[in-house]
């Protein structure tokens, strides 16, 4: 995979990742390693900045002067004590535990790695890109399951460029994972407004970027990722991430822009309904009076939540799997209400092989929430990046140039039909009983190449299956 980060960030990533291999001997997984780095980086930078939010007895300085055994014991106390705080400390250290069992390896990490760098002296871009590089390496480790929280960077950057956040707008990701979309939005605004005033810079750092993440371990990674890029403050209303269930209640505050890749699992354990059920079997029902449809389908509930989250005049780009575009029942009802109440104007059909969940076919749905209803003729534009295009995370990852034509056409007010793109009358979409959005067309130039590629895909899958079985047998053998 091409790494567009600065050389300094790449060097820092390699240095940090080499230590991971040392700690793996202690039974530490990739996610555990990144999590422990997060705690230690925060403590080291707070010490460099003389941050009084951390009591001296739990500071970085209280650790580094101890021997290995005493350091190991005290580090556990530090994590427990700081986890009881609120605000930023609570976000970073909530329920934190020391997972490094060997005191000598902990001391190696603190003294020989983290302690050898003046982190606050590094630029936000350098240390932020280095940390994001670690998160990407973590996501590539398919055994850890971390890939479900990671969307390919070129896709994120293209989506954000299309949505084009403006200074003064609030940008939100209600399923933010490790904050990739939020960072891209922040970077986009910094590039677009290079001469911001001090007040505008503070607003961007503390008020404009908002994310929600359900999983506590991931929320702390997202928080640290943003902090290292200069996003976030100490006050409660300056925290960039909330660790909670986005769907549990109607949004307390609406936002201007939503960019997100919600979880791909179809069935959730909770049903969201407009009113409370009296049936005992519906005890796992959460009341959302602003929802159109009662369903346990997470993707459909996120679509409904995003519409509620947007201000009138707001806009959204949402990554969804194929079933959201064509299934009947609750999905059809949600699509119809979405098309009727919002301006669904663009669908980008993505090829498989982009995500760490194998075989997933997905799309990006772009829509606006109008300030007032309009009777003007509307069209929905479909861009097909799927036909005759195949990608894989290791051998042929998606690159930014693969999306350039789409980004260019997206910004064009007059989109002429082409080989990969067509527009359809929204009235025709609404006339379909299921209001399907998986709209397609037959183009000989595009389709003629597809059968051969389909056969190649089939052969590739067979080879991969054989290799995985062989590796599994090797792993089980006594001498391995």
Image (tube, helix red, strand yellow):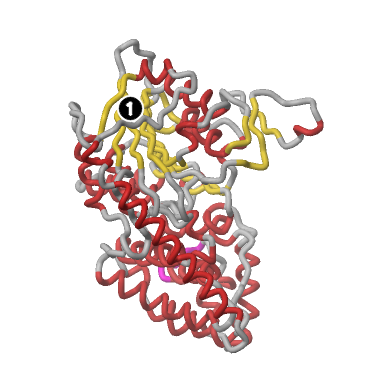
User: Going by the picture, which residue comes out furthest to the top?
Assistant: 375
Horizontal side, residue 424 vs residue 434: left or right: left
Q: Is residue 210 above or below residue 123?
A: above
Q: Nearer the viewer, residue 376 or 111?
A: 376
Q: Position of residue 32 (x, y in %)?
A: 55, 69
Q: Nearer the viewer, residue 217 or 413?
A: 413
Rendered residue at 54%/32% (across/down)? 251
Q: Residues within 10 Å of mark 1 (few under 14, many from 20)?
A: some
Q: Is residue 332 above or below residue 360?
A: above
Dividing the image into 4 quarters, which one contains the C terminus?
Answer: bottom right
Q: Position of residue 472 (x, y in %)?
A: 56, 74
Query: For the point 32% across and 36% down, which residue is it?
Result: 168
Considering only vertical position in the picture, is 464 above or below 184? below
The answer to whether residue 139 shows anywhere in this view is: yes
Per the picture, the main secondary structure of the magenta-coloured stretch is: loop
Residue 384, horizontal then vertical, whole percent? 30, 39
- Write the residue at 38% across / 39% down: 364
- Front residue of 77/280: it is 280
For the point 31% across and 64% down, the residue is 1
Name the residue beneath numbered marker 1: 345
- Height in image: 106 above or below 388? below
Stretch of the chain drawn in magenta:
48-52
Is residue 118 found inside the magenta-colored segment of the image?
A: no
Instruction: Tell me, yes or no, if residue 198 can be seen here.
Output: no
Q: Secondary structure at mark 1?
A: strand
Q: Position of residue 143 (x, y in %)?
A: 53, 66
Relative depth, front residue between 435 and 470: 470
Within the image, what quadrant is residue 416 found in?
Answer: top left
Q: In this rendering, would 476 be left or right of 6?
A: right
């Amino acid at each position: 995979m091409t790494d567009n980060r600065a050389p300094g960030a790449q060097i820092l990533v390699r240095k940090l990742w080499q230590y991971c291999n040392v700690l793996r001997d202690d039974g530490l997984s990739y996610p555990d390693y990144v999590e422990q780095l997060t705690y230690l980086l925060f403590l080291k930078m707070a010490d460099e900045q003389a941050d009084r939010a951390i009591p001296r007895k739990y500071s970085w300085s209280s650790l580094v002067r101890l021997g290995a055994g005493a350091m190991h014991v005290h580090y556990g106390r530090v994590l427990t004590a700081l986890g009881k705080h609120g605000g930023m400390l609570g976000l970073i250290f909530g329920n934190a535990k020391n997972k490094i069992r060997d005191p000598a390896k902990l001391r190696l990490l603190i003294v020989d790695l983290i302690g050898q760098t003046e982190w606050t002296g590094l630029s936000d871009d350098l240390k932020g890109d280095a940390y994001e590089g670690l998160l990407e390496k973590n996501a590539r480790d398919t055994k850890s399951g971390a890939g479900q929280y990671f969307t390919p960077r070129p896709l994120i950057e293209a989506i954000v460029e299309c949505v084009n956040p403006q200074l003064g707008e609030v940008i939100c990701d209600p399923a933010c994972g490790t904050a990739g979309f939020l960072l891209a939005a922040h970077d986009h605004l910094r590039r677009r407004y290079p001469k911001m005033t001090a007040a505008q810079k503070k607003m961007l750092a503390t008020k404009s970027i908002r994310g929600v993440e359900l999983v506590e371990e991931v929320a702390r990674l997202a928080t640290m990722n943003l902090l290292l890029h200069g996003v976030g403050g100490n006050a409660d209303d300056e925290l960039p991430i909330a660790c909670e269930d986005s769907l549990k209640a109607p949004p307390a505050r609406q936002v201007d822009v939503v960019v997100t890749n919600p979880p791909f699992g179809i069935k959730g354990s909770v049903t969201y309904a407009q009113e409370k059920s009296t049936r005992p079997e519906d005890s796992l029902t959460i009341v959302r009076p602003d929802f159109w449809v009662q369903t346990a389908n997470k993707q459909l509930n996120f679509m409904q939540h995003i519409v509620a989250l947007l201000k009138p005049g707001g806009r959204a780009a949402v990554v969804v799997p194929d079933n959201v575009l064509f299934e009947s029942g609750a999905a059809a009802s949600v699509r119809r209400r979405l098309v009727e109440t919002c301006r669904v104007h663009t669908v980008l059909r993505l090829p498989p092989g982009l995500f760490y969940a194998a075989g997933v076919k997905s799309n990006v749905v772009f829509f606006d929430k109008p300030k007032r209803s309009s009777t003007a003729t509307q069209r929905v534009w479909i861009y097909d990046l799927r036909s005759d295009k195949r990608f894989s995370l290791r051998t042929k990852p998606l690159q930014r140039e693969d999306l350039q034509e789409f980004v260019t056409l997206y910004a064009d007010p007059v989109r002429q039909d082409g080989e990969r793109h067509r527009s359809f009358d929204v009235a025709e979409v609404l006339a379909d009983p299921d209001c399907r959005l998986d709209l397609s067309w037959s183009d000989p130039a595009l389709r003629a190449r597809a059968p051969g590629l389909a056969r190649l895909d089939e052969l590739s899958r067979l080879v991969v299956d054989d290799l995985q079985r062989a590796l599994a047998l090797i792993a089980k053998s006594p001498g391995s």
